[in-house]
Image: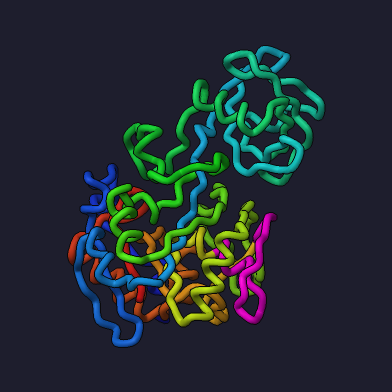
Amino acid sequence: MTALEELLNYDLPKDLIAQELTEPRDRCRMLVLHRDTGVLEDKFFYQIAEYIKPGDVLVLNNTKVLKARVRGIRQTGGAVEILLVRPLPENQWECLIKPLRRIKADEKIILNGGAEITFVQRMDHTAIVQFYMSPQELDQYLNQWGEVPTPPYIKRKVSFEEYQTVYAEKPGAVAAPTAGLHFTNELLKQLEESGIKVTYVTLHVALGTFEKLADNWQERDALHQETFFVSEDTIRIVNDAKRDGKRIFAVGTTTVRSLESAAGSDGVVKSTFGDTSLFIKPGYTWKVVDKLITNFHLPQTSLLLLVSSFATPELILKAYKHAIDERYRFYSLGDAMLIL
C-alpha cells in the first residue's frame, strides 16, 4: 500500500473526533509540519504568531454559515425537510429535499413561518428551488426559522455562534470553513499590529466538502462546485506581497480553492466572482499559496488529497500518525495543523 492509499484510509479512534471547540478558541493544539525538513512541532494555536513575519499575508474565508436546514409543508399536506446546498443566480438554490421523488415541477412548498418557495427541477441527487426573497431577507428568515446543519459525526447540538468564525460576514455557506474557527478577535488584532496583512476571500462552503472520493477520482479533473469571490483589495494585497517576496498563508482549504482558482498560470491573482470546481491533488502545480493552516480531515476525502499535494503523502501520513499518537482532536471542531 502506498503512503497516499494508507493516508486516504487511515483509521481514527472515535474518541478523537472533537465534539466541541476548545475555549478560548486559540488555545487548541496546533501541529506544525516543516515541509523542508519533515520536522513536527507540538504547539498551541495562539503561537502561530511565531511563524508569520511582518509583511506576510494571512488570507481568511469570511463566508457566514446559514441555518440551512428548514422544514415545510407541500400542497398535499406532506411534511418536507430542505437543506440548502449551494446558492444559484436569481435567488435559486440547489437543495437536498426529503422526500424528493414525489415533488413535481412548479409545485409550491410553504415553509415554517409562512415563506413560499417553488420546486423548479430535479437533479441527480438534489433539486433546484426558487426563493422569493433577497439574500439578506433569506438570511434573516433562516436566522429565525432555520437549523444549523452540523456534520453527522458531531453528536451534540452545536450553537449557531460556535459553528461560525469570529469574522464571518457574507451569508451563504452550509458548513463552516473550520480552519478559521481557531482565530479570536484578539489574535487577529495581535497579528495585524505586528505588521502582518490580514485580508479575506469569500467561498460559500457546500456539502460536497464532506463527500467521499469517487472510485474513479484519479481520472477526474473537477470536483463539486462552490461559489467564490476574490475582491480587488485582496488581489492587490496578495499580488503586491508575492512581488515583494512575502509569503501567503491560506487559512483553510476553501481559501486555497479561492486563491488558486483566481490565479493565472503566471501566479497573478485576478478579481473573480463565479463557481470553482478546482480539484487539487498530488501533481498539482501551486501558484499562490505558500503556507497552509488547516484542520485534520476525514479519510477518503478530496481535502486529504489537497493537503497531500501541498506537502507530500508521506509527510501528511507521518503528521496524521503523530497526531493520533499524541491524541490531537480531529475534524471540524478539532485541532489545527500549520504546514510550512
Q: Quadrant of residue 134?
A: top right
Residue 213 location (% of width, % of height):
54, 62
83 with respect to 299 (left or right): right
Q: Is residue 115 left or right of residue 38?
A: right
Residue 206 is situated, as x and y percent measured from the top left of the image, at 56, 48
Is residue 75 covered in magenta? no
Residue depicted at x 49% and y 69%: 306
Which residues, given as a range, are shown in magenta? 257-276
Horizontal and vertical percent position of residue 210: 49, 52
Q: Assign the N terminus to one quadrant of the image.
A: bottom left
Which residue corresponds to the image point at 55% horizontal and 61% vertical from the top-left?
A: 234
Residue 45 in view (yes/no): yes
Report the front residue among 91 and 110. Answer: 91
Give above or below for 48 relative to 157: below
x, y percent for residue 224: 63, 56
Quadrant of the drawing holding the C terminus: bottom left
Q: Is residue 266 magenta?
A: yes
Q: Is residue 193 left or right of residue 298?
A: left
* Residue at 33% in and 68% down: 338
